[in-house]
Amino acid sequence: MILNENVTRDDIARELHDWACDPPRIRAGLSNRARQAITAGNAEQAVLDGGGGGHSVFTAAVLDALRGQADLDGDKVVTFGELFNHVGRTVETKTQQRQTPLQATFPDHEGGCVALFPPGIKPTATTVADRLLALEKTKEAEELWPCVPEKVAPMSNWLVDGKDLVSRRTSHEESLLRIRQEAYLKQVVAGLIEEGDTSEPNWDQAAKTSRWRYETTKRLLGDLGKLEAVVAEVQKRRFAKPERPALPPSLSELRRTSRARRSMPPLRRE
């Protein structure tokens, strides 16, 4: 990810052709999943000072975002979307829209998302990524049968990944509650609903971003519920004792049966 207050989106566009012809310059030290950039404004806008601490408005907004102000869901991970939303909103407000941050992606951007987090924090996947994983794991479960020896290892690995994904359910439930509370409080402050009349916001009047986050997280929880049932079924079959097929009678048993039949008295005919 690139953050630069001296480079505009037009500057990036002029350089993209040369950069695309030299992939190692882009890829060096960067993930092959995301190619994202945030600029301080467009080509006609000057970078304004006055952000505090000797920084420009743009730099101060970025620093505040990385200190946690952009972490809307409280998971201690700042995604690219959270960073851009905070920086864009803050800079536009403080400069009275004389400076408008922009975002851009490079030609080899693969659709990933940059995630920033402090040392010691293990970032959890985003809601959308978790939902895709849940659907993928549920589909993979169909390929684990029958439980033949060569599928024991893949089944064990699947269980580890499936359990890890299901364990995030509580975190997503907390995120759903925060999203609902934030939307509710915003509508109360705006006078759209009366506090105490209802505990649920009017999602038709909620911001598109909030509504999308709410609906996506809610669908994810449904997918995780289905995956949890599949994990339980896979674990049950993985550790179930196989039924032993009935063995054919041994030679000694056949001999005993034969002797018993010879010792039986003959049937009398009336």
Image: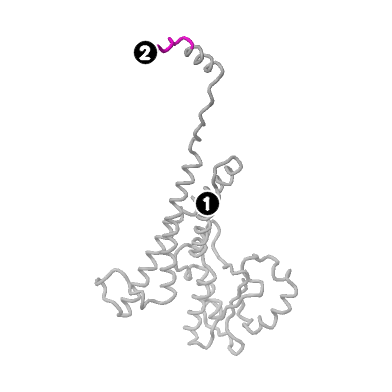
| Residue 66 in the image, given as x and y percentages of width and height | 52, 69
The residue that label 2 is drawn on is 270
Q: Residue pushed farthest bottom?
A: 44
**What is the quadrant of the C terminus in the image?**
top left
The front one of 87 and 202 is 202
Q: Are marks 2 and 1 in contact (CB under 8 Å)?
A: no
Up the image or down, 257 lies above or below 41; here it is above
**Disc nearer the start of the sequence (2/1):** 1
Task: Look at discs 2 and 1 and give the one toward the viewer.
Answer: 2
Which portion, as a residue range, is magenta?
A: 262-268
| Residue 214 in the image, given as x and y percentages of width and height | 41, 68
Q: Residue pushed farthest left?
A: 197
Please, what is the three-letter code of the amino acid marked with disc 2? Answer: Glu
Numbered disc 1: secondary structure: helix
Please, what is the three-letter code of the amino acid marked with disc 1? Answer: Glu
Q: Is residue 257 left or right of residue 23?
A: left
The residue that label 1 is drawn on is 142
Up the image or down, 160 lies above or below 7; here it is above
As for residue 221 lying within the magenta part, the answer is: no
> Residue at point 62% right, 87% down?
43
The way the protein has been coloured in the rendering is: one colour
| Residue 53 in the image, given as x and y percentages of width and height | 53, 76
The front one of 182 and 257 is 257
As for residue 266 lying within the magenta part, the answer is: yes
Up the image or down, 96 lies above or below 171; here it is below
**What is the quadrant of the N terminus in the image?**
bottom right
> Residue at point 32% right, 77% down?
189
Q: Residue pushed farthest front?
A: 270
Q: CA distance from mark 2 to mark 1?
A: 65 Å
